[in-house]
Amino acid sequence: MAKRILLVAGARPNFMKIAPIMAAMAGRPELAPYLVHTGQHYDHRMSHLFFEQLGIPRPDVDLGVGSGSHAQQTAEVIRRFEPVCLEQRPDWVVVVGDVNSTIACALVAVKLGIGVAHVEAGLRSFDRTMPEEINRVLTDRISDLLFTTEPSANANLAAEGVEPSKVHFVGNVMIDTLLAHRERAAGSRILEELGLGGRRAERPYGVVTLHRPANVDR
C-alpha cells in the first residue's frame, strides 16, 4: 500500500519548495501525496498564481486561514489542520521552510503520532526576535526527519544536539525550481512590457522581493 504523505504549503516561498517535491513524488507509485494549502497567503497573486506557474497540482484541500497576528494565524492553522489529519490518516506530514503554517502543522502531526519531515531544516539567523527563527527552531526540535540544504545547517543541528540519524543533506529545492523554470524566465517579455529595454538593455534589471519585517521594518 502506498504511503500517504501530506505536504503543506502555506506562504509564497513554500510554493517554490513544494513544486519539485511534488514533481519527484509523481514518479513514485509507492507514495501517495496529498497537498494541503493552509491559505496563510490568501491573495490570488500570492497563492493560486504560484500553483499555476509552477505546475503544482490543485491543492486537495485549502484551509483558507487568511491573515491575523502570529498567534491567531498559528492557532487557526492548528484548528483547521487537525481534522484533515484525522480524516486522511497520513504516514508522514512534510512541512517546508519557516512560516507559521510550518510549525502549526508540525505540532498537529506530532501530537497525533504522525511522522514529521522538515524540508530546509537547520537554517538559523540566530536572531530570536524574528518570528521565523522561532518557527525554525521549534519545528526542528519536533521533527523526525530533517532535510538540510547546506552544510551549515547540518552543523547547526549537530551543535543543538539533534540525533545525526535524523539529519539528511539533500540540497536546495529552490535550486531545483530555478533550473526547472530558467528557460521560461529567460523568454519572458516583462522588461519590454515595462519599458525597461528588455534583455539587451545597457543596465540589465533583476527583481528582488523583500517581505519579512526583519528586512523591511527598519
Image: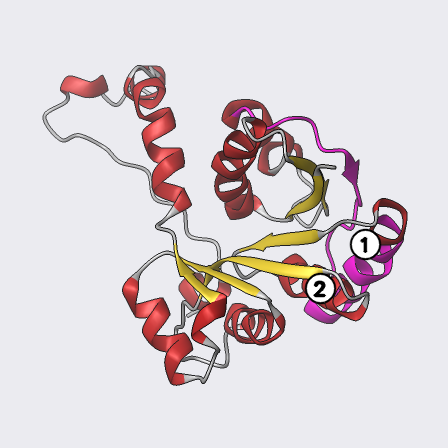
Q: Residue at x 68, y 53 (%)?
A: 93
Identify residue for label 1: 81
Question: In this picture, which residue range is highlighted in magenta?
Answer: 55-84
Between 9 and 205, the one nearer to me in the picture: 9
Q: Is-magenta flag for residue 72? A: yes
Identify residue for label 2: 104
Locate residue 102, reporting x and y percent.
Answer: 63, 59
Q: In the rendered view, does 135 fall on the left or right side of 192?
A: right
Would you call the spot at circle 1 few (<14 residues within 10 Å), some (14-19), or many (20 or more)? many
Rendered view: 130 above or below 185: below
> What is the residue that sits farthest to the left in this orientation?
202
Q: Which residue is drawn at 35% across and 34% down?
A: 178
Locate residue 41, reporting x and y percent.
Answer: 65, 46
Between 87 and 43, the one nearer to me in the picture: 87
Q: Quadrant of the C terminus?
A: bottom left
Say what amino acid the circle numbered 2 marks.
Ala
Along the polypeptide, which appears first: circle 1 or circle 2? Answer: 1
